[in-house]
């Protein structure tokens, strides 16, 4: 019995180790140039914000996905008075490192100076489900789900090998709990992925942008949005993007260049 238990434990540990190795290999990420980032940091400290921003942007253009780079770039834009790009890059930093207190504090500071679009609108059930895993990145959630899956299989296998009724009952309870967690986080990840594909988040980066009733500058406008306003994008027609707004609002279109999506891997809006 003890030998079987040790064997199962070893198999489980090997599966998890192999999983971790596979994730590392299958998700390559360009590393930031430490010298260039340090040079950008020095320029920022000296007040040379435009030059610092250029160096940070060059790192991002290389495919670097580093929360510190996005965080520093967001702070540079804030110092330049560009609230839209400050919020945009801090949101990107938060996606990569959602539990960083400095990122959240700076975002809260800047959001206080921006406009909330239709803040009174309640979040839908899909958004609420997606927020179950908001303290984890999508990759972390996926890793957690795979871990739950392997653990669930390990528990069922252990239950089959165990002869003690008491131990079997305990393993069954543990397996049920893991299954519930697997379903909850699985639905949350699926909701986040669905929302990212159908209603990608965006930030207004123009100082102000008039919202038109149809995709064209000649159509009447009802209101304007200011830099830093968070929006959700529905579709794109030519050089115009339709926003997700309450059905009672007729004006929904803005020029595409006035908004940038938060996702660093761009999602097509069609």
Image: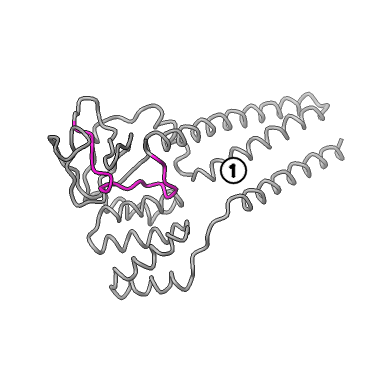
- What residue is rendered at 23% in x and 34% in y? 252
Q: Give the residue pinned by disc 1.
A: 143
- In the displayed structure, 129 sits above or below 141; it is above
- In the displayed structure, 30 sits above or below 154; it is below
Using the image as rendered, state which of residue 198 and residue 94 is in the foreground.
198
Indicate yes or no whether the magenta region holds residue 247: no
- In the displayed structure, 216 sits above or below 90; it is above
Using the image as rendered, state which of residue 149 and residue 77 is in the foreground.
77
Q: Position of residue 176 (x, y in %)?
A: 64, 26
- Marker count (numbered): 1
- What residue is rendered at 33% in x and 73% in y? 45
- What residue is rendered at 30% in x and 29% in y? 122
Using the image as rendered, state which of residue 181 and residue 146 is in the foreground.
146
Q: Position of residue 201 (x, y in %)?
A: 35, 41
| Span colored in magenta | 251-268
Using the image as rendered, state which of residue 100 and residue 192 is in the foreground.
192
Q: Image quarter for residue 123?
A: top left
- What residue is rendered at 44% in x and 31% in y? 129
Q: Residue furthest front?
A: 238
- In the displayed structure, 162 sits above or below 254; it is above
Q: Does residue 93 appear to the left or right of 172 in the view shown?
A: left
User: Which quadrant: the C terminus?
Assistant: top left
**SS state under label 1:** helix
User: Which quadrant: the N terminus?
Assistant: top right
Sort mark 1 into few (<14), some (14-19) or many (20+) by Cα contacts within 10 Å. some
Q: Position of residue 166 (x, y in %)?
A: 76, 26
Q: Position of residue 229 (x, y in %)?
A: 25, 45
Q: Does residue 126 appear to the left or right of 260 in the view shown?
A: right
Q: Image quarter for residue 36?
A: bottom left
């Amino acid at each position: 019995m003890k030998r079987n238990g040790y064997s199962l434990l070893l198999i489980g540990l090997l599966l998890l180790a192999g999983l971790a190795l596979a994730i590392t290999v299958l998700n390559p990420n360009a590393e930031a140039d430490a010298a260039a980032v340090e040079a950008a940091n020095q320029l920022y400290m000296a007040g040379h914000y435009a030059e610092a921003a250029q160096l940070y942007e060059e790192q991002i253009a290389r495919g670097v996905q580093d929360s510190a780079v996005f965080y520093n770039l967001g702070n540079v834009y804030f110092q330049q008075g560009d609230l839209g790009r400050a919020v945009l890059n801090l949101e990107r930093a938060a996606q990569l490192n959602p539990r960083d207190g400095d990122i959240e504090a700076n975002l809260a500071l800047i959001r206080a100076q921006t406009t909330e679009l239709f803040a009174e609108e309640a979040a839908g059930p899909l958004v609420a489900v997606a927020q179950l895993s908001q303290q984890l990145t999508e990759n972390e959630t996926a890793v957690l789900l795979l871990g739950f899956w392997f653990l669930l299989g390990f528990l069922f296998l252990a239950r089959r090998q165990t002869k003690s009724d008491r131990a079997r009952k305990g393993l069954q309870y543990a397996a049920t709990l893991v299954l519930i967690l697997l379903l909850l986080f699985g639905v949350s990840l699926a909701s986040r992925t669905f929302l990212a594909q159908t209603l990608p988040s965006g930030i207004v980066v123009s100082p102000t942008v008039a919202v038109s009733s149809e995709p064209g500058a000649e159509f009447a406008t009802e209101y304007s949005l200011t830099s830093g306003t968070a929006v959700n994008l529905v579709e794109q027609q030519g050089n115009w993007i339709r926003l997700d707004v309450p059905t009672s609002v007729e004006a929904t279109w803005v020029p595409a260049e006035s908004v940038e999506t938060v996702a660093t891997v761009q999602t097509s809006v069609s």
